Amino acid sequence: MNIANKLTLIRIILIPFFIIFAVPTPEWLSEPVFSFHQQYGTLIALVIFVIASLTDLFDGYLARKYKLITNMGKFLDPIADKILITSALVVLVERGQIAAYTVVIIIARDLIVDGLRLVVSEKGEVIAANVFGKIKTNLQIISVCLYLLAFYINLWYIPKIVYALALIATVYSGVIYVKESIKFIKD
């Protein structure tokens, strides 16, 4: 297994730890050990999320630069990305920071795009990633970080604005994928 795939696996392994620290402890758990979690859990979750997000940046870079692209990497990397982002967004819903319907929109877009990619690939075609898909991912990552950071410092409406932009980029990139797919499906 090459270094790029190892980084992807590390990202997947970090996800449960992110969730453990990001989900607030119930109020009825007032033992000292849980007091630490309530004070520092979000900060630890933020650090874990940043590290996991950076592995996404580095695994792709290393795979392209050193020609380490494998079928395993092509399979695992997008799954790891989706699990990380979706887990983080579900945690933010649980914490009351974002609305559940926005996460449903993001998940629906991802399922539609993945389904269309599969249909198009069966025709021997590939839909290239578009810039709005990359913008979407980056804005989602930044918004999660901002929401977690907002637990400690007042960021006013900045997390909400960045998340709204992420949602717009999500929908727009999905529309682009649908339009591109229709061209191949009609042929």
Image (spheres, helix red, strand yellow):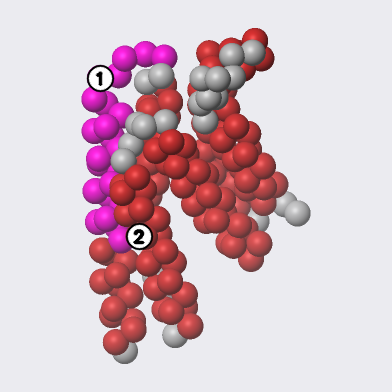
Give the amino acid at mark 1: Trp
Q: Which sits in the foreground, 10 or 42?
A: 42
Image position, residue 149 (x, y; %):
41, 21
Image position, residue 148 (x, y; %):
43, 26
Mark 2 or 1 closer to N-term?
2
Q: Quadrant of residue 153?
A: top left
Q: Which sits in the foreground, 115 or 138?
A: 115
Point out the residue furthest to the right here.
1
Q: Quadrant of residue 52?
A: top right
Predominant SS along the magenta part: helix
Secondary structure category for the residue under label 2: helix
Image position, residue 106 (x, y; %):
36, 53
Report if residue 164 lies within the magenta region.
yes
How many numbered circles does the render carry? 2
Q: Which residue is at 31% across, 41% downward?
A: 99
Label 1 crowd bin: few (<14), some (14–19), many (20+), radius 10 Å: few
Name the residue carrying label 2: 109
Point out the residue furthest to the front here.
28
| Residue 156: mark in rendering | 1
Left or right: 34, with 185 as reference point: right
Q: Which sits in the foreground, 124 or 175?
A: 175
Is any atom of residue 93 visible in this view?
yes
Q: Is residue 180 above or below residue 95?
A: below
**How much space separates mark 2 and mark 1, taking CA atoms?**
28 Å
Give the amino acid at mark 2: Arg
Secondary structure category for the residue under label 1: loop
Is any atom of residue 61 visible in this view?
no
